[in-house]
Image (tube, rainbow, N blue to C red):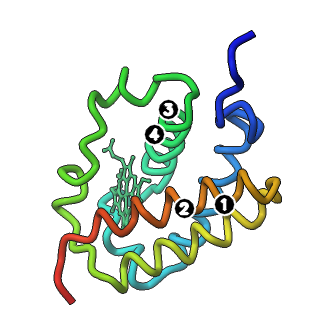
Amino acid sequence: QAKQTFYEAVGGEETFRRLVRRFYEGVAQDPLLRPLYPEEDLSGAEERLRLFLMQYWGGPRTYSERRGHPRLRMRHAPFAIGEAERDAWLKHMYDAVQELELAPELEAQLWDYLVYAAHSLVNTPT
Ligand code: HEM
């Protein structure tokens, strides 16, 4: 029996669907973040983030089949991300993570990664 992936442990695709849907509800209302997103309809961005996170945590590799190597720093280069944008992104993600009501150790693992990743994508001095 193979060890369960984090993806499976948190409930698979449905959990990531809920996480990212809730996150983009926040982004849609955010006056700092919303203008950064090039598309009028956020559903494409929502799907890309969901597929990326599913893949990162050991789920299906659909993200890379569609988009290739993630190269997140490069893909964020067109958007000016300073500390304020990072913190706004993390605020919506925090709310979305809370709503999942995961076991504390799973929640901590997910949140620590998101904080680390968001810090690594700041590309604009403030
Ligand atoms: C794409 C903003 C952090 C993962 C994007 C896009 C924007 C954006 C504007 C383009 C939307 C689109 O796909 O059409 C930000 C801001 C962040 C942030 C302001 C604050 C630090 C993160 C983090 C992750 C992430 C921490 C991963 C854990 C992605 C992915 C895409 C994306 C996977 C789609 C890449 C692609 O395939 O084109 N982000 N992002 N972002 N972001 Fe972020």
Badge 2 or badge 4: first in the primary sequence: 4
Q: Residue furthest top?
A: 1
As drawn, the label of residue 108 is: 1
Q: How many marks?
A: 4
* Residue 4 placement: quadrant: top right
Residue denoted by label 3? 55
Q: CA distance from mark 4 to mark 3?
A: 5 Å
Quadrant location of ligand 1? Answer: bottom left
Q: Nearer the viewer, residue 15 or 41?
A: 15
Q: CA distance from mark 1 to mark 3?
A: 19 Å
Q: Residue at x 24, y 43 (%)?
A: 71
Residue denoted by label 2? 112
Badge 3 or badge 2: first in the primary sequence: 3
Residue denoted by label 4? 52
Is 91 on the left or on the right of 2, as rendered?
A: left
Is 103 on the left or on the right of 113, as rendered?
A: right
Label 1 element class: helix
Amino acid type at mark 1: Ala
Amino acid type at mark 3: Gln
Amino acid type at mark 2: Asp
From this view, report whether residue 10 is shown above or below residue 32.
above
Q: Position of residue 82 (x, y in %)?
A: 27, 80
Q: CA distance from mark 3 to mark 2?
A: 17 Å
From this view, report whether residue 21 is shown above or below residue 27.
above
Label 4 element class: helix
Q: Are marks 4 and 3 in contact (CB under 8 Å)?
A: yes
Q: Are marks 2 and 1 in contact (CB under 8 Å)?
A: yes
- Cβ of mark 2 under 8 Å from ligand 1: the answer is no
